[in-house]
Image (spheres, rainbow, N blue to C red):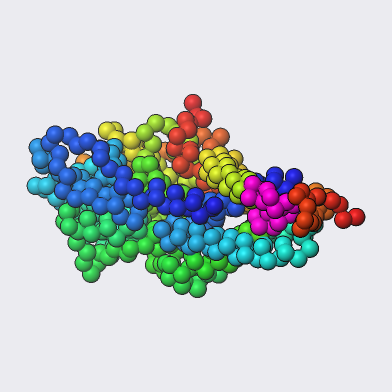
Amino acid sequence: MIKFAVFICGAIVMSFEILGSRVLAPNFGSSVFVWGSLISVFLSGLSAGYYLGGRISDVNPSSRKLAVMIMTSGILFVTFPLYSTPVSDWIFEMDLGVRLSPLVASIILFFVPSDFLGIVSPYTAKLMICSLHTSGKTIGTLYALSTFGSIIGTLITSFYLITLAGVNALIMGQGVLLVALAIPLYIMNLSCSIEPTASAGVIRDIK
Amino acid sequence: MLQKIYLAAFCLMLIPLQGFALEPSEKLIFEKNSLYQYIQVIEDTVKKERYVRNQKKEFTQGGIYVNAPDKLRFEFTQLFFVSLAFLDRDPNDVLFVGLGAGAMPKYFTGRYPDAVIDIAEIDPDMVAVAQKYFYFKENERMKVHVEDGRLFVKRTKKSYDWIILDAYQNESIPFHLTTLEFLNEVKSRLKENGVVAANIISPYRNKFFDSMVMTYKKAFPHFAIFKGKNSANFIFVATTGSKIRNKDSVKATARKIQSARKFDIDLEAFASRYEPSKEYEWGGAKILTDDFAPVNLYQYQKSGAQ
């Protein structure tokens, strides 16, 4: 289940980025500045998320907390169409120039959601590392799953999804998927305790 | 991990797409990877013609006769001028979206020297190429604005009599210049009874063409289509008025401005290609919007119309 969540979150990050270029184009065009802004903001969000996710996972990690993070990004996605147009229009009116306008718009629209999705990777790594002997394998598997998800998300979105539905509908659909993903993680309430001396750790229910 | 994907994507964007063989008579005189495209200036030493191209011969954006740079070399550029016959007056304020080799604005200003012309072109290198190799010159009445066409239209406070939309490349069509929202923004920049003309390329009837027809239909109550005979171009001519001129009236006006403005192309013959948009409408096509506009995929899908 946790591996599945990592895969889906990886797919949604990149799919959201592709769709983000469509969200920005009407007000900011599709110049290199728009792509540069978009990519750098997603990377900033992810790196902030990795850092934060690592920090908070050190304090009583549980899949219930992870579920709350995923749920939050899901809610941001579902409500995205409500705020994306006013924000874009507002920045368009301010006219900060060809470089700054798309950069500021990207920061406001995409930094926080990508930050929450960035938290998922280190947090799940922590949840799944129950043995220090196999932690390399676990982290490697999670990295691979996340990036493989990103590849699939990029391809499916740019090749197929944009012919099937509108950009707003797709982003909301991803939000629904994130919420749906968070629910079982919340109910399962997995946690992992590392026993320093044991060669293999255990995953157990707290309750 | 994700960084690697970005890195790979960036590397792909930087690979120069070139190396397409030239005809024996053709000579490469300039090439550059600009921010937006691979620009190639080619001279045909036998035909004495010069072109600006992206990659392949089929992707020629424009060109001139070297010995007669003020003539219009390409059919679609000639065809565009028939849309002047839909105006009930001389155009004073004119907007071109997309410069190419600059042949059309140069030709236009030669015939209408009093008109004030704005040109929106996103690629600064294309402007430099038009100036250096295609005898295009700005003056106090004709200015190029290096800006995304959509942003120019949204930002400008000016209204225009005649707007020319020619910013689509063969293979890469900017989706935000195809949507209903964009056409409505263009419409809002037209003066009363103003005319907009657009170049739609469709080598075969594809879904993109069907959707463009229905999107124009939605934005403008009336429009006419002029089909290229030796090219895959269709010129859409739309007006804001509640009535559109019929074929005979367009032909009559074409004949009039032909002699008044000394056109060296047969505007009246072009006018006789007039087809009402009805001929091409297909209700099954989806209207393109900012939310839904899969233009690149639609270009490769066959039309659903019979």
Residue at position x 22%, y 36% from top? Answer: B21
Q: Is residue B92 visible?
A: no
Outermost residue, right side: A207
In-front residue for pair B134/B265? B134
Residue at position x 20%, y 48% from top? Answer: B41
Question: Compared with residue B4, is residue B210 higher up or lower down, i.e. above or below?
Answer: above
Q: Is residue A101 left or right of residue B232?
A: right
- Residue A17 at what x, y percent from top left? 55, 54
**Taken as a whole, is the magenta stretch helix, strand or loop?**
helix
Q: Tell whether position A129 is magenta.
A: yes
Q: Is residue B53 left or right of residue A102?
A: left
- Residue A90 at what x, y percent from top left? 55, 70
Outermost residue, front side: A197
Residue at position x 45%, y 60% from top? Answer: A36
Q: Tell whether position B57 is magenta.
A: no
In-front residue for pair A113/B138? A113
Question: Compared with residue A1, is residue A62 higher up or lower down, i.e. above or below?
Answer: below
Question: Compared with residue A104, is residue B100 higher up or lower down, i.e. above or below?
Answer: above
Residue at position x 66%, y 63% from top? Answer: A54
Span highlighted in magenta in the image: A121-138
In-front residue for pair A6/B60? A6
- Residue B175 at what x, y percent from top left? 46, 49
Question: Compared with residue B222, is residue A71 higher up or lower down, i.e. above or below?
Answer: below
